[in-house]
Amino acid sequence: MKRSIRILSLILLSALLLISFTSCMSLDDMKAAHAFYDENGAILYDGHTYYLLPECSELTVSEFDSINVTETDVPVLLSDTLGDSYDVSPQKIFLSMYYRGKIYCREDYFEDVKNRIENGYTMDRYCFMATIDPENTGDPANSYVDYELLKPKVASVLLDTMEIAEPMILPSAGMKYEQIIRINRCSEDTFFQSYAFDLRISEGIYYVAVTDSVQSETAYYRISDEDLPLIQNTFYHAA
Amino acid sequence: MVKKLFYYEFKSYLRALVPVNLILLAIAVMTRLLQLFETESISYYLLYGSSLSAYFITAFVAMLLTTITVIVRFYKNLFSAEGYLTFTLPVTSTQHILTKLVTGVCVGAITTVCLVLSGMILTAGELLVEIFKAIGYLFKQIFVAEMGWHIALYILELLLVLILSAAYQNLVIYACIALGQRSSKNRIMMAIVCYFAYYMISETVSTVLTLIITTLADSLTVLEAIGKFFTNHPLASIHIFFLISIAVVTGLGILAFYIIKKTVDTRLNLE
């Protein structure tokens, strides 16, 4: 009897000791989303250091995830209450806090991006916001939203449409549309962007739309039927 | 004799409350062990959710059972047929009431300790470590940094307030039971009515006082002076608040004790 009680106590103690070394998934998620400021004001996250970039209104970052950044002595359970919330870009290159105009860049990209902000950059490509499913699973949980470059052929179709097609000038709220896809002029890596025009879909017809905010008018250029398949295949996954 | 009284009181309480507290601890251990198999599947969430619900229900039952046991034990031991035996003991009515009060508060404290222990078992592991880190951080940053050595006194005062409040709550219930005994019929119903009356009166008094203070704060010089003192001496104000709470609870507790003693000494009418 005493022996069985001893064995039972040993098993129970082992179970309780085993529990002491385990964590839980929600705590692991909080730790993964917890970053720290170092003594120089840089951010330490995911094994990398992120440095603050100079302000640049055309530096555009999409949101993939969010983290909480605190001083090093703040416990993880208080990170969302006492920390600053930053959005993380896809591939974790940028950490952004838009409402304060702060964007931090990962150490391996920092010098290049800073240099371009200070000395100039070219925006000779076009992009739009798309839903990316890197493993093609079709599961929304595995996809994320990011900027996708337009192929040069697609960009040239859109630009040529504006040159060739006869515009339909309507007041800015003059047409009902099912979808509006914003097309930005951008750099090769889509880090720098500025608004160019829209692609609007109304009753199955695709238009390139250019808005004149001064006149409150929008010019609609209808995309030709022969270019339609290319446009549909490009923008089917627009976000 | 009083020692024996305490012994049998605790024995009676623990006989009723130890099983439910052991069940509570067992459910906490089981729920924590379930977390070893944590996945993102629906079946895990259903199982874990059910276990967690069982834990909270058991915790509620433990607290409710403690309160009910304390009340029923007081009533049965002093005001039912058991009272014939109770009052033959060589113990004064004051000693009877104090024994019931002290054991009732102690049993409430034991249940609270079991609840805290079960909570610690539920979060055992890294989560418990992080909880302690967070509490320690808050304590250091907010309390120690702002309040310095006052924090030690605040803790003592708070403990005293908590113990006296627990005793006071029990005394109020005992006093309502004692007042209910003064009725010739439906004594338990009268005790409940007395408790409701106490609750309504206390809520009305506190609402009226709050209204007076908030509406006349700027116009009455005394209130204005008090307000200025609180603003200029926040740390001392907290001590004063605790001391006033202790005084009020003690005063009301003594009144309730007097009601119970008076009933037991002069108006005892056993079934």
Image (cartoon, rainbow, N blue to C red):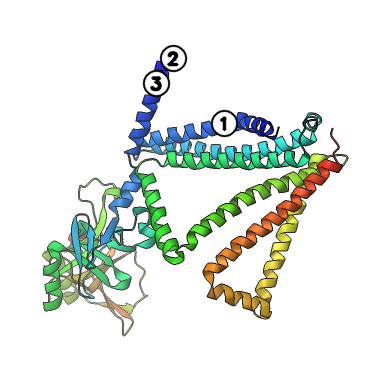
Q: Residue at x 79, y 45 (%)?
A: B261
What is the residue that sits farthest to the right in this orientation? B184
Marker disc for residue B246: none
Mark toward the viewer: 3 or 1: 3
The reply to whether discs 3 and 1 touch (Cβ–Cβ < 8 Å) is no
The answer for how far apart the CA atoms under marks 1 and 2 are is: 24 Å
Give the structural element (helix, strand or loop) at label 3: helix
The amino acid sitting under disc 3 is: Arg
- Cα–Cα gap, marks 3 and 1: 23 Å
Mark 3 and mark 2 on one chain: yes
**What's under tag 1, amino acid-wise?**
Val
Q: Chain of mark 1?
A: B
**Dot 2 crowding, Cα within 10 Å, few <14, some 14–19, many 20+:** few
Q: Could you tell whether B174 is left or right of A182 in the image?
A: right
Residue in the picture at 36% in, 49% down: B130
Question: Which residue occupies 15% across, 75% down?
Answer: A117
Circle 1 residues within 10 Å: few <14, some 14–19, many ≥20: some
Q: In the image, residue B234 lies at what x, y percent?
A: 53, 70
Which residue is tagged 1? B18
Instruction: Please tell me whether mark 1 sits on a helix, a strand or a loop.
Output: helix
Rendered image quadrant of residue B29: top left
Query: x and y percent of residue B64 in the render?
Result: 62, 40
Residue lying at the far bottom of the rendered structure: A214
Instruction: Return the residue at label 3.
Output: A6
Residue A1, numbered label: 2
Q: Please tell me which residue lies in front, A8 or B78.
A: B78
Q: Position of residue A40 (x, y in %)?
A: 21, 68
Q: Check the picture and name the quadrant holding the C terminus of chain A.
A: bottom left
